[in-house]
Image: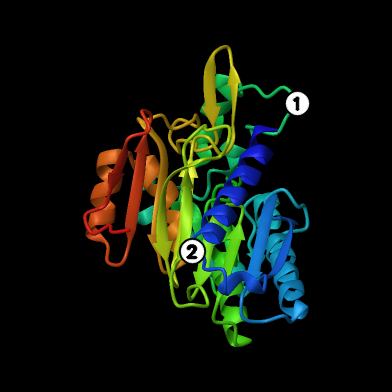
Amino acid sequence: MRFRKTIWLLTAVIIFCTATTAGCSEFSRKPLTYTGVALDTVISIQIYDSRDEELTKHCQQLCEEYEAKFSRTIETSEIAQINAAGGAPVEVSEDTVALIKKGIYYCDLSDGAFDITIGSVTSLWDFKAEDPAPPAPEALAEAVKHVNYRKILINDNTVRLLDPAAKLDLGAIAKGYIADRIKDYLKSEGVRHALINLGGNVLAIGGKLDGSPFNIGIQKPFDEGGSPITSVRIQNKSVVTSGTYQRYFEKNDLLYHHILSSSAGTPCNNGLNSVTIITDSSLTADALSTTCFLLGPEAGMKLINQLDNVDAVFINTDNELSFSRNYSK
């Protein structure tokens, strides 16, 4: 329940921050809006310079089509077929190959701290159960033996896991990839002012109709009202946050969140509550927000400061903010 509530609150914060900074003349005509549930989250598409509802319908279809390829829990998906193949090669779409290759890039970048073969571990955790509990230590110890992205073999459109017990989980990058594809579609249809929000993965096409940027709130961790702790102003940028408060449960006075260590299989506790990335690509922002969280505050910020056109906001467990070297509101 906390997972769903957090998504709704984050969505509300983003819409609130966007709307309250706009001029009255701009919003005399409300944006064309689609809100629904897909990708196991709440999605929202707001288009400011078109009234063509076919655009939002097609965006919904894109979400459903990509989910049908990328979800590890849909038995007919391409990822589920790879996971169930027992090490045999599986032919998949160009989208799935592209997403896996992007995942491998960030696995390499983090030297395995981020690992897309963590599916053997994530399948043991159920954050949406009525009475969630951490997996048995022996089950986790066995699962982490099969986390090794270097055992992914790609040959043209064929993917094979060299470890038959390994499992892909692309949840940390799939929404970013999908948001980028929705942006590509909308721009091809002439849209120049829109806001795409896939469960907190926010991507802006252009800015507001008056030329000013969108103002996007970053949620204060664990704030029940979903209040922003700060905000960022963006045009043609994506804002993605990975945080301990987005999906978690408490058991015996301990908090268990969904950002899991690839080496231990348990929640990564390193003094951070969240990492927010601001950059052009939503996939890049998605991948780096998780990667930097897993690397920790020092190594994560060092990585960001070495990258071009990437900004970050780190929030520690005392809700203190740290900003990347070139960050500016």
The residue that label 1 is drawn on is 130
User: Where residue 49 sits: x, y (%)?
Assistant: 62, 81
What amino acid is labelled 1 in the image? Glu
User: For the point 66% across and 61% down, which residue is it?
Assistant: 44
Q: Is residue 30 left or right of residue 120?
A: right
Residue 30: where, in percent of width, then height?
67, 70
Instruction: Give amino acid for label 2.
Output: Ser
Quarter of the image with the C terminus is bottom left
Locate the N terminus and report the quarter of the image it occupies: top right
Q: Identify the residue shown where x is 27% and y is 47%.
A: 301
User: Foreground: 174 or 236?
Assistant: 236
Q: Label 2 belongs to which residue? A: 282
Seen from the viewer's position, the closer of residues 315 and 178 is: 315
In this rendering, position of residue 206 left or right of residue 298: right
Name which residue lies at 45% across and 30% down. 264
Please state the horizontal and vertical placement of residue 277, each as a whole percent of the image: 40, 55
Q: Is residue 80 above or below residue 29?
A: above
